[in-house]
Image: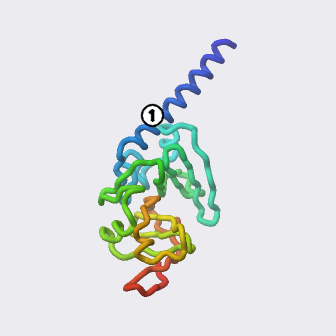
Amino acid sequence: MKSYIIILISSILVSCGIQKTKENEFNTHQNLIINNIGLEKYPVGKTKIDKVISDLGPNYKTKINSSEGVYEIIYEELGISFYRKIYDKSEIITGVRFYAPFNGITDTGIVLNKSTMKDVEKIYGKGIGVWNDSVLKGVFNGIIFISNLESKSLSKEEQMSNKVEEIYITLYRGDIDTKIIEYKNDEIEIGF
């Protein structure tokens, strides 16, 4: 009985140590977010969710979005979520989302929680618009940039000054894609 308790306590301490190490790795060092790949260690389209859980530990939440057909593994303390298709038996990651406290920079130089949506537009071009009246979203091939709007009455220039709060890498643009309102020469147009 005594050895069982020692093993149990050791397992808990090791698990906590893994999580704390990953928190330090993801939050204190700037991590490279690669378009169409995500993180080099966990490439989208190639990595099984079991590998992620084995490496990052059991301290995660799950969420199922049945309308999207997506299962989400959420590591809030790390600022990273992994997605896979619900009915895909291979359990391969189809998307990864980065948010605070994750410390990341894209391979094109966009820094999470520091760069603005205007910076995104300079690098990626047009494709940023308002989604659901509360989110500014830039949808590009394999990468999506998101910023929450604090006020609906902001001008386009003020909206574009918002910081990039989330970066989402996906194999399937449709995972979170919806119609967005796109600005083109200060005229509003519905588009994808």
How are the colours assigned in the image? rainbow
Residue reaching furthest to the right: 1
Q: Quadrant of the N terminus?
A: top right
Point 51% across, 68% down: residue:
149
Point 53% across, 37% down: residue:
57
In the displayed structure, would residue 179 be above or below residue 80? below
Residue reaching furthest to the top: 2
In the displayed structure, would residue 151 be above or below residue 42? below
In the displayed structure image, the side of residue 49 where residue 111 appears, left or right: left
**Residue at the spot of label 1:** 21
Q: Position of residue 142 (x, y in %)?
A: 40, 64
Q: Residues within 10 Å of mark 1 (few under 14, many from 20)?
A: few
Give whichever of 192, 46 is nearer the camera. 192
Point 50% across, 29% down: residue:
17
Amino acid beneath label 1: Thr
Q: Secondary structure at mark 1?
A: helix
Instruction: Using the rendered view, name the quadrant where residue 126 is placed.
Output: bottom left
In the displayed structure, would residue 142 be above or below residue 97? below
Give whichever of 136, 190 is nearer the camera. 136
